[in-house]
Amino acid sequence: MCAVLRARDAQGASAIIASALLVFAASSVSSMEVLVAQQINALNGTMVKISCTFTSCYKLDISKFAMNWTFQQTKNDTEEMFMTFKNRIITLKTDRFGDRVKFAGNLDKNDLSITISDVQGTDQGIYNCYVRNPPDRVEGRGRIQLSVVSELPPPRDSTIAVAVGASIGGMLAMVILSMVIIKCIRRHKKQELISDEQKMEEEGKTDGDGGTEEGTKQI
């Protein structure tokens, strides 16, 4: 029995490590990161929170910021928008959700999470969280698979997996934070360099014009 539990814990730890490596790989690709749980189980008839947060080098500007939440039953189905942002949060009433969807995030903390009350079997599917935060040119996207179940699986001893997951989670958070800081510093330095080059170019043009005038006066 102990051997079986250890094997399960090892599998859980392996899954956590694989997820961590996947997130780390994504963090090295773009300047905007959208952080979500890839799989969520919701108990039928209860309320579920679907979390979506993002990181960016730039402060959120309401006049330029854009967000969309969409739903699709499978990857091949058309996406159905049920929430958007146009200077404010707008919840679109649909036949599927009615008024059961609420915004549960905090824009000041880059949190775009939502809740769905009275979860039903028809709510099962893929939820997409789209984010755009100019001047960031990259549009972020988070995809969450929601499964609706009639009963949650019984708890089991996962001490090893939890310990490994907590350790990896802490390290991963530090790595992602470091990557974001490095990207922001590089981006700001690049912008400063471009500004300095433009300034030098303008000064060079001014000096050139002044030299011509002096030469004319001497003649």
Image (cartoon, helix red, strand yellow):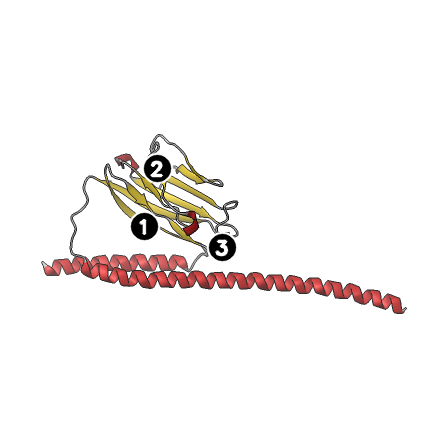
Q: Which residue is mark 1?
A: 37
Amino acid on which the number 2 mark rests in the picture: Val
Q: Is residue 59 left or right of residue 128?
A: right
Quarter of the picture containing the C terminus is bottom right
Residue 58 in the image, given as x and y percentages of width and height: 49, 55
Residue 46 in the image, given as x and y percentages of width and height: 25, 39
Residue at screen point 52% across, 46% down:
64
Quarter occupied by residue 175: bottom left
Q: CA distance from mark 3 to mark 1?
A: 24 Å
Q: Residue furthest left?
A: 1
Question: Which mark identifies residue 101?
Answer: 2
Neighbourhood count class around disc 2 (C-alpha, 10 Å): few under 14, some 14–19, many 20 upward: many
Quarter of the picture containing the N terminus is bottom left
Residue 140 in the image, given as x and y percentages of width and height: 43, 50
Q: Which residue is mark 3?
A: 58
Q: Is residue 138 left or right of residue 169?
A: right
